[in-house]
């Protein structure tokens, strides 16, 4: 027998309790990892190459308020801007679906790939799109999901605008973090709406990362004190702002995660204290046999730490395995394309488990250290 | 008060003065219970010779277990001198005392106190895990100790698979496996039937008589006490004879 063997025997002497304790840690850490992954997916900054150069320009009052189309020439004149496209959310339903499952945007096809440089579409398909005002390009994921292909027609029933769009799929794009959207001619939308006076937002590509802050300042200043003041911001800031429309998601998830960890801590301390309390007599005997406080603390710590780590392996490992294997896009009804349990989140879960294992060992270890052999023996009979 | 040891052990002979393994002088133990001081032992002086089988008797609360705990180094005196094998153990710190117990004292308790998830051999091995012995050496010592108490064939049995008498013999093997000079037994037959008690007492007697171990046993039972080489009585924390 070894000391580690002794610890393992002790940890599993009450198999049901060990199992339930481990599962409680596992379930809590699974929840924690899921929540943190959810938060990350909502708030993670875009990682594609062009993201650092892209600037979103929206109405300062609200994202829901349009901007006048006449702003475009003024924007194009701002030094440091390489390209600008209108970018208007259409929000149509496809086929008989109850909700909008993928986004559709009206853009200027001629500059689209200059702004979204990561989107790759074969040149001949792009040329086809440029030519046909009633065509669109569709993300590869959406094509796959609906079993449609280039050359097919797609009808989008307007929910946001009182018009329906019949579009021919001219091309398929890929290479962006989210290859689900549909892009079509803004002029098509303008005609359908009988106007062409407004756009939803402008998306701009700065010439370089160095000039981007200056471009943002100039954009904001250019339209200050006009009828349509703008808020220009980086793509990541825009996305965070978009998420913030849900309320303070970060605070909410942070609060829930804290409650999960705190509850877990209480359960772990209670379980370990109970387990050690039952063994006071044995620990007193071990003291009598020559085991020192630090060795007994080592036993308790190893047991607590071990159970917590097994729980982490099941909880965080289970979350990793589950979210790596399921179709999260399907499961979330298209809300998430990715639901990546990153190594950092797994490490966070193991760190929480390790801290939990250590903290849960301290109260019973103190109780054992404070109890003399004689007092320990008195608890025997 | 002191009680002279009866020269019975092989190590004590009329020609050679007895070598004392335990020497107590004016030993007192006072417990604080709220505002009240309770004197468990009062100025006890005693010498215990090497190889002696000393029996401590007395009514409940007389201080016999307290005396045993002090000698075994699991409790500390309030006053007085306490030398065991020439060491003033009351001056050792917690860590030193733990090491000292591991190397010098074997414990046998009334309720056996074996670890239920460990086999007989593993229970006996527990004190050896603190030593530098390798696995093979530990295994050999465990086999020897279990053989000494007649349980070589029960080595891989769990405590619940053994009788009370066998459990207590495993506890004795655990007490002996580090080859301590001093074995302390607190009511070792209190939970045993007459036959098992006889076996256990026989082993303790043999340890003293045949192996030169100093055995100190607390008991209420006069029949058990008869196995000892000397009996001393305590009452209200003082030696009476």
Image (cartoon, coloured by chain):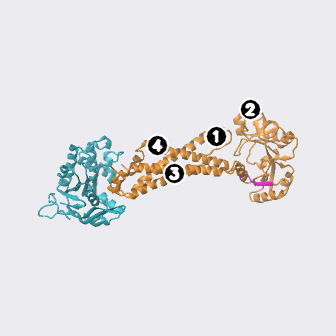
* Numbered tag placed on residue A96 in the rendering: 2
Q: Is residue B153 left or right of residue A287?
A: left
Determine which residue is flagged by label 3: A265
Q: How many marks?
A: 4
Residue B203, percent from left and from top: 21, 49
CB within 8 Å, label 4 to label 3: no
Do badges 2 and 3 share one subunit?
yes
Q: Is residue A170 magenta?
A: no
Which numbered disc flags the more N-terminal residue, 2 or 3? 2
CB within 8 Å, label 3 to label 1: no
Residue A357 in view? yes
Instruction: Give the camera-side residue of A118 and A136.
Output: A136
Determine which residue is flagged by label 4: A19
Which numbered disc flags the more N-terminal residue, 4 or 1? 4
**What chain does mark 4 sit on?**
A
Q: How busy is the neighbourhood of tag 4: few (under 14 within 10 Å), some, or many (20 plus)?
A: some
* Numbered tag placed on residue A312 in the rendering: none
Spatial CA distance of label 4 from label 1 is 30 Å
Up/down of A174 relative to B31, above or below: above
Question: Which one is closest to the eye, mark 3 or mark 1?
Answer: 3
* Numbered tag placed on residue A328 in the rendering: 1
Spatial CA distance of label 3 from label 1 is 30 Å
What type of secondary structure mainly makes up the magenta span?
A: strand
Which numbered disc flags the more N-terminal residue, 3 or 1? 3
Q: Is residue A146 left or right of residue B111?
A: right
* Chain rendered orange: A
**What chain does mark 1 sit on?**
A
**What chain does mark 3 sit on?**
A
**Disc 2 on helix, strand or loop?**
loop
Q: How busy is the neighbourhood of tag 3: few (under 14 within 10 Å), some, or many (20 plus)?
A: many
Instruction: Write down the region rendered in magenta.
Output: A230-236
């Amino acid at each position: 027998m070894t000391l580690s063997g002794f610890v393992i025997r002790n940890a599993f002497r009450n198999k049901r309790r060990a199992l339930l304790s481990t599962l409680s840690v596992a379930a809590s850490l699974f929840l924690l990892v899921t929540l943190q992954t959810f938060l990350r997916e909502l708030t993670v900054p875009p990682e594609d190459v062009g993201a650092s150069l892209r600037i979103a320009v929206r109405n300062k009052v609200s994202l829901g308020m349009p901007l006048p189309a006449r702003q475009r020439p003024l924007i194009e004149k701002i030094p440091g801007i390489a390209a600008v496209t209108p970018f208007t959310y259409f929000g149509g339903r496809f086929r008989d679906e109850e909700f909008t499952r993928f986004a559709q945007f009206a853009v200027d096809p001629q500059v689209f790939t200059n702004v979204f440089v990561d989107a790759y579409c074969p040149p001949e398909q792009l040329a086809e799109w440029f030519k046909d005002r009633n065509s669109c390009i569709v993300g590869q994921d959406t094509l796959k999901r609906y079993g449609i292909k280039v050359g097919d027609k797609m009808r989008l029933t307007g929910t946001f605008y009182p018009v329906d769009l019949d579009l021919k799929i001219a091309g398929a794009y890929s290479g962006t973090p989210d290859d689900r959207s549909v892009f079509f001619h803004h002029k098509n939308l303008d005609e359908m709406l009988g106007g062409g006076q407004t756009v939803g937002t402008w998306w701009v590509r700065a010439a370089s990362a160095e000039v981007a802050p200056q471009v943002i300042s100039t954009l904001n200043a250019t339209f200050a004190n006009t009828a349509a003041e703008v808020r220009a911001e980086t793509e990541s800031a825009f996305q965070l702002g978009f998420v913030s429309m849900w309320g303070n998601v970060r605070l909410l998830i942070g609060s829930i995660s804290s409650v999960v960890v705190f509850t877990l801590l209480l359960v772990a301390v209670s379980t370990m204290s109970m387990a050690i309390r039952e063994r006071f007599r044995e620990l007193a005997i071990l003291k009598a046999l020559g085991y020192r406080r630090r060795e007994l603390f080592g036993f308790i710590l190893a047991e607590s730490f071990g159970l917590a780590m097994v729980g982490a392996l099941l909880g965080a490992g289970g979350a990793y395995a589950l979210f790596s294997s399921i179709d999260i896009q399907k499961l979330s009804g298209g809300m998430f394309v990715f639901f990546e349990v990153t190594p950092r989140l797994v490490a966070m879960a193991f760190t929480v488990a390790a801290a939990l294992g250590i903290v849960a060992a301290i109260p019973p270890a103190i109780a054992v250290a404070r109890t003399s052999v004689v007092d320990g023996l008195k608890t025997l009979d | 008060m002191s009680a002279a040891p009866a020269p019975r052990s092989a190590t004590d002979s009329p020609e050679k003065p007895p070598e004392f393994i335990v020497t107590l002088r004016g030993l007192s133990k006072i417990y604080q219970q709220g505002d009240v001081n309770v004197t468990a032992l009062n100025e006890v002086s005693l010498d215990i010779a090497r190889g002696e089988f000393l029996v401590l008797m007395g009514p409940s609360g007389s201080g016999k277990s307290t005396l045993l705990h002090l000698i075994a180094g699991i409790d500390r005196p309030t006053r007085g001198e306490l030398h065991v094998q020439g060491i003033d153990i009351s001056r050792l710190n917690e860590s030193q005392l733990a090491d000292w117990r591991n190397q010098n004292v074997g414990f046998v308790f009334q309720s056996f106190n074996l670890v239920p998830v460990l086999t007989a051999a593993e229970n006996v091995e527990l004190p050896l895990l603190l030593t530098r012995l390798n696995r093979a050496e530990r295994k050999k010592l465990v086999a020897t100790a279990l053989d000494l108490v007649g349980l070589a064939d029960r080595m891989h049995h769990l405590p619940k698979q053994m009788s009370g008498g066998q459990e207590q013999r495993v506890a004795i093997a655990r007490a002996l496996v580090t080859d301590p000079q001093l074995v302390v037994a607190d009511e070792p037959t209190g939970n045993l039937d007459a036959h098992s008690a006889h076996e256990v007492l026989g082993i303790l007697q043999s340890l003293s008589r045949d192996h030169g171990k100093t055995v100190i046993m607390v008991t209420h039972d006069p029949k058990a006490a008869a196995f000892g080489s000397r009996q001393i009585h305590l009452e209200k924390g003082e030696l009476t004879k």
